[in-house]
Amino acid sequence: MSASSAGLPALLALDWGTSSLRAWLMTESGQILKEYHSKHGILNLPEGGFSAVLEDLLALWSLPVLPPAIACGMVGSANGWAEAPYLSCPVSPDALATSLKMVQTGQGVLSIIPGVRDDAAVPDVMRGEETQILGVLALRPGLAEDVTIVLPGTHSKWAQIHQGRIVGFRTFMTGELYAVLKAHSILGRFSAPERPSDAESIMAFEDGVRTGASEDSVSSLLFSARSRVLAGRLSPAAVPDYLSGLLIGNEVYSGPRLNRASHRTVLVGDDALCARYLRAFRLLSQPEPEVFGNTAPAGLIKIAHLAGLVPDGARSQPFSGVGA
């Protein structure tokens, strides 16, 4: 009997980032049996470091031994558990699977997925997003021929996929720039502590999107968050929504031009954040993207299959080290 048909765990899959960790215990077919989330990212580890986090996770799930394990994200950076060198575009799923960094932990072997590098005139890098991208293609193989995958977040990625390979991408520091401006700039100090009404929030966001869709320098456009308040055209309480709209609008306006986007686009990530991006796409009359949630689990199991960590079929022996 296979692990998937028995519902037994076959893989420990980890998305280990800078500020958080997400983990899934999965069958060989990718069914999620257990899920875990913590703030123990690589820059917020407890005493004992990476190994202590992994040991605590095994204890939490009553796993006496480590099953086949795979991880993506900043855990493979120079500041992570072990560095998994970048692969240069174009990058295929098979290339990622054959370039895993094997780390001998105190509990067993952990396979870390490498990041991806774009060696264009303006070089770029990603770690973790490559696995989410593979998750999209695993869930929807028909998209692999030619699609732009947009992954909003602290550092948003616009990745171009052609014939199943990541052929190029660009990063937008939209999320981080918003956080810095809100917390450490005159624009953030200009906002009011009270929350705007829902209608006012939506209007401010949409005004920001339209303002951001411009060839003008974003540093010039940002000052409008102050000048609009002074002119009585924006309430202080709505400044954060306006800033969010301006930055997202500028990204959605610029992304297709900078990244040679295909006519097909998908959004991947947090539902609330993707909803904001989707609104910006509609306001700017861009082709409406299909929206996916978190595709990291699908990408992790796909790479585990390709690497032979977990058999992709029904003839495997299950991992049976699960406590009661």
Image (cartoon, helix red, strand yellow):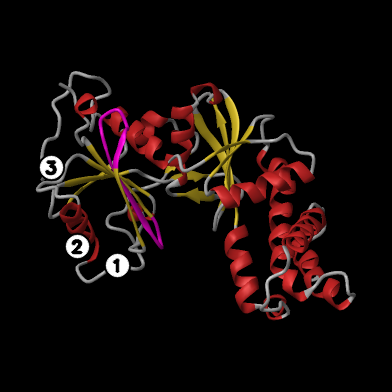
Residues in magenta?
17-33
Whether residue 166 sits left or right of residue 186 in the image: it is left
In the image, residue 245 above or below residue 281:
below
Q: Mark on residue 45?
A: 1
Identify which amino acid the numbered label 3 is placed on: Val
Which of the 4 image quadrants contains residue 319? top left
Amino acid type of the residue that numbered disc 1 sits on in the rendered structure:
Leu
* Camera-nearest label, 3 or 1: 3
Q: Which residue is mark 3?
A: 322
Q: Which is nearer the N-term, disc 2 or disc 1?
A: 1
Identify the residue under disc 2: 52
Decide: is 307 above or below 200: above
- Picture residue at 69% right of the left edge, 54% below the top: 248
- Say which residue appears at 82% left-offset and 70% top-offset: 234
Which residue type does callout 2 highlight?
Ala
Residue 19 inside the magenta-drawn segment: yes
The answer to the question of whether label 2 and label 1 lie on touching residues, with beta carbons closer than 8 A, is: yes
Give the side of residue 288 with respect to residue 233, left or right.
left
Judged from the image, the secondary structure of the residue bearing numbered disc 2 is helix
> SS at mark 1?
loop
Q: How far separated are the C-alphas under marks 2 and 1?
A: 9 Å
Q: Quadrant of the N terminus?
A: top left
| Residue 269 % position (x, y) | 52, 46
**Mark 2 vs mark 3: which is more N-terminal?**
2
